[in-house]
Image (spheres, rainbow, N blue to C red):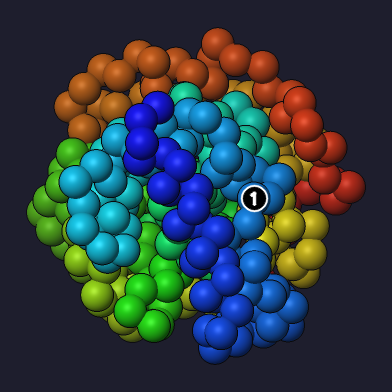
Amino acid sequence: MGAVLPLLILAAVLAAALACAAPRPRGGPATAALGPPSWLAETEVIDWRDPSILRATEDAVAGAEGSRERAVRIHDFVRDRVRFGWQPRFYEVRASEVLAAGVGYCNTKSSLFVAMLRAAGIPARVHFVDVDASILRGVIDPGTSHVDHSYTEVWLDGRWVRTDSYIVDAPLAEVARAKLAAEGRVLGYGVHSAGTSTWDGQRDAFSQFVDDGSSPDFHRTDFGVHADVMAFYRDAPRTWNELGRAARLFIRFGLGPANRRAAELRGSEGPEVADLTDRASCGPPRTTAPSSRTAPRRGAR
């Protein structure tokens, strides 16, 4: 895999040591409980030592100078190499599986983004919030007023920089924002009308979590930082979209059409993405147990 790969692993080890001197993360109890080593560690779904993740990271950062440029390269890779959509196992997939499938939504693309950043020796963590479910109008109706959402915090130049601009691939995001402008709406088709798909590694950038007051009741709950999406659904109270029996049934019949609508919007048939949920099993991941909770949370908090 070339001389770059051992350097990536060495960089991750060195960055873990340096991160111990970094400020404690801000946020609620879940954030405070995470020590600095977790910012570079593997988790249940952030499997950054997987050979496919290491190869993809090596390719993405080839020729980049410095952590910021490596982070931006990885951002653009995840944004456009993994199209916006859903897999049959929803969030119960490893980062390496997201990469292999070439499709993901906020929670699974965040797993991949963080995995690749950590493989490049850049500390990163996942922050969970909720957003108005209207952001998905025109693609899918999740059946809840809000949906669980995640964005990534990246440690660059001695501070955390926040972004979710990698979630919606650029072709879809461009069409989506144009349609919102024509319709005079703020939310829909997977994006916020004031969102962006670019990130420079210096300023916060969001395609979805644009909490600027333009949409009433856009955001209700800040769940804080969790080790990964599996830990989030184990530990966070009153989440919206945790997998239960009803949710798994919805996934079986709802995500295939949603992926096809996303493909139609971006102007490509994308059968490998659009038909993914029709061809694959809807069971839990091979290495993770199904959640003990039974249904997604609904209604007002």
**Residue 16 position in % (x across, y down):** 56, 66
> For the view shown, which residue lies furthest in the top direction?
279
Horizontally, is 146 left or right of 89 in the view?
Answer: left
> Depth check: 53 or 255 in front?
53
| Residue occupying the point 36% across, 30% down | 2
**Residue 240 position in % (x across, y down):** 66, 58
Q: Quadrant of the N terminus?
A: top left
| Residue occupying the point 60% across, 27% down | 88
Give the amino acid at mark 1: Glu
Placement of 163 over or under 141, stated as above or below = below
| Residue occupying the point 46% across, 37% down | 54
In which quarter of the view is residue 154 placed? bottom left
Placement of 209 over or under 5, stated as above or below = below
Find disc 1 in the rendering and name its residue: 42
| Residue occupying the point 72% across, 29% down | 285
Horizontally, is 222 left or right of 3 in the view?
Answer: right
> For the view shown, which residue lies furthest in the front direction?
3
In which quarter of the view is residue 146 placed? bottom right
**Residue 74 position in % (x across, y down):** 32, 49
Badge 1 element: loop
